Amino acid sequence: MKTNSKSIEQLENDYWKDEIIFPSNLVINCHKYRKISIKNLTTEQLRLLISQKIGIEYLAEIAIEKLELNILAEGDLYEGDLLEAVLDLPTEFWNEKPVEFQTFQNLIKRNSELIKTELGEKKSDRINEKIKTSAQQCL
């Protein structure tokens, strides 16, 4: 079975109990999305799981592929929310995934004008600063 046809639960071999102690929408959705085959996750589901640092070792590459198609891919929040979620992955994660980090860094460089035009100069500067900081820490 290909990796992307499996769910995060299957990939991690970690099956969360159906009984949810703190049943907020966030927790309920995280539980639900962990059961979905990762190839079938929507942009919003990817954004939510990545922002909660759930299954990131499996989802980052898929998110980057979506961002290659549309750097401003949008979940339910705002234009570029998937980019923001991936951007907020910890440096420790990128240290383990240098090839993916390089791909992500190049993707942002290639799309810098679009990011600046669509998201504004302030947000563009913040994105570039965050990438620069991560790159320095990954050395």
Image (spheres, helix red, strand yellow):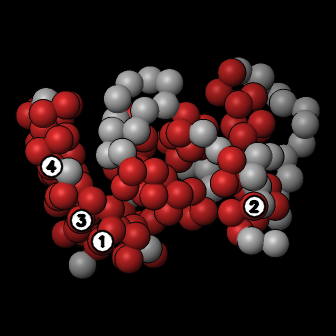
User: How much space separates mark 4 and mark 3, taking CA atoms?
Assistant: 10 Å
Residue 20 can be seen in this image: yes
Disc 2, SS: helix
Q: Amino acid at mark 1?
A: Gln
| Spatial separation of the CA atoms under disc 1 and disc 3 | 6 Å
Query: 80 and 130: which one is in front?
Result: 80
> Could you say which is closer to the camera, residue 96 or residue 117?
117
Query: What residue is shown with label 3?
Result: 106
The numbered mark, 2 or 1, whose residue comes first in the sequence reads 2
Q: What crowding class fits label 2: few (fewer than 14 Cα within 10 Å), some (14-19), or many (20 or more)?
A: some
Q: Secondary structure at mark 4?
A: helix
Give the residue drawn at x 32%, y 62%: 104
Distance between the alpha carbons at the discs numbered 1 and 4: 15 Å
User: What's the CA distance linking mark 2 and mark 1?
Assistant: 25 Å
Q: How many marks?
A: 4
Which amino acid type is marked by label 3? Asn
Labels 2 and 3: the sequence-earlier one: 2
Return the residue found at the far front: 69
Whole-number angstrom distance, CA of label 2 to CA of label 3: 27 Å
Residue pointed to by mark 2: 5
The answer to whether residue 78 is left or right of residue 51 is left
Residue named by callout 4: 112
The residue at which mark 1 appears reads as 102
Q: Is residue 35 left or right of residue 85?
A: right
Which numbered disc, 2 or 4, marks the residue that appears first in the sequence? 2
Give the mark, 1 or 4, whose residue is nearer the N terminus: 1
Quarter containing the N terminus: bottom right
Sequence order check: which comes first, mark 4 or mark 3? Answer: 3
